[in-house]
Image (spheres, rainbow, N blue to C red):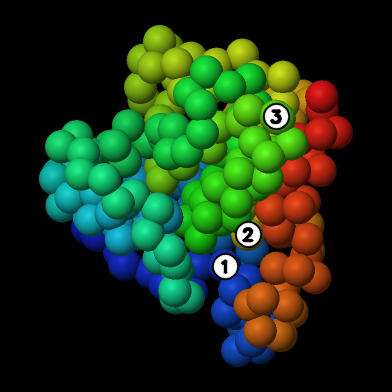
Amino acid sequence: MKQRVVYVMTHDSIGLGEDGPTHQPVEHLSSLRTIPDLLVLRPADATETLECWQIAIETKDHPSILALSRQGLPALRTEYVKENLSAKGAYVIAGDKGADVVIFATGSEVAIAVDAQKALAAEGIPAKVVSVPSQELFFKQSDAYRAEVIGKPRARVAVEAGVQMSWDRFLGDRGRFVGMHSFGASAPIEALYEHFNITPKAVVEAVKAQL
């Protein structure tokens, strides 16, 4: 109906598995991204949340969804930037922009990607983390901007506590996905991410497997 409707949704991942089998939304993010003209926004921290809210209220001709995490998240963006970086859909949030290893992530998994980037740097492997608050907005950017963000990486990894379906355009034929391949389980968040291997170590291993 081309209406500006903003949906604010929480409980966005298996991190809420402690609440039982009704809290395992592994397919929701990819499913929502298949809906035409629906803008899906999954911010990584408080700064991205403010940016995504601005995007949603300034979008006048179609609905938006803010997919928010219920668990506490670290502040990853602490320096003032005048530009709304989330409006580009994706941008380099950590690491060397020229690195030929790229780790894509959204929401609560951006912090995991940043930890993996630091671990790779300690081993002499330069990598960059690309936060992707909105796939839809990213693919509306110019070819030049998308090429600037992604580059020509030797290794690509995407990290999200959901299924892989909506990440294939980012990963190509050789990229690796660190995420869910089943439903979740009922346990504390720390145990769940370790059990399902959504960890910095898993990201590092996925990168090395392509080098």
Circle 1 packing at 10 Å, graded few (<14), some (14-19), many (20+), is many
Give residue 169's mark: none
Query: Nearer the viewer's eye, disc 1 or disc 3?
Result: 3
Q: Alpha carbon of mark 1 to alpha carbon of mark 2: how far? A: 6 Å
Q: Position of residue 81 (x, y in %)?
A: 21, 39
Q: Alpha carbon of mark 1 to alpha carbon of mark 3: how far? A: 30 Å
- Do we see residue 36 in this rendering? no
Q: Which residue is mark 1?
A: 13
Q: Position of residue 205 (x, y in %)?
A: 81, 43
Query: Nearer the viewer's eye, disc 3 or disc 2?
Result: 3
Q: Which residue is mark 3?
A: 125
Query: Please, what secondary structure does the residue beneath circle 1 have?
Result: loop
Which residue: 61% across, 44% down?
118
In the drawing, does residue 140 fall left or right of residue 28? left
Q: Quadrant of the C terminus?
A: top right
Q: Position of residue 28 (x, y in %)?
A: 55, 60
Say what amino acid the circle numbered 2 marks.
Ala
The first of marks 1 and 2 along the sequence is 1
Q: Quadrant of residue 25 in the image? A: bottom right
In the drawing, does residue 11 fall left or right of residue 82? right
Residue 29 versus residue 55 in the image, above or below: below
Q: Which residue is mark 2?
A: 161
Say what amino acid the circle numbered 3 marks.
Ile
Q: Are marks 1 and 3 in contact (CB under 8 Å)?
A: no
Q: Are marks 1 and 2 in contact (CB under 8 Å)?
A: yes
In the drawing, does residue 74 fall left or right of residue 20? left
Q: Position of residue 182 (x, y in %)?
A: 78, 64
- Count up the numbered dots: 3
* Direction top: furthest residue: 144
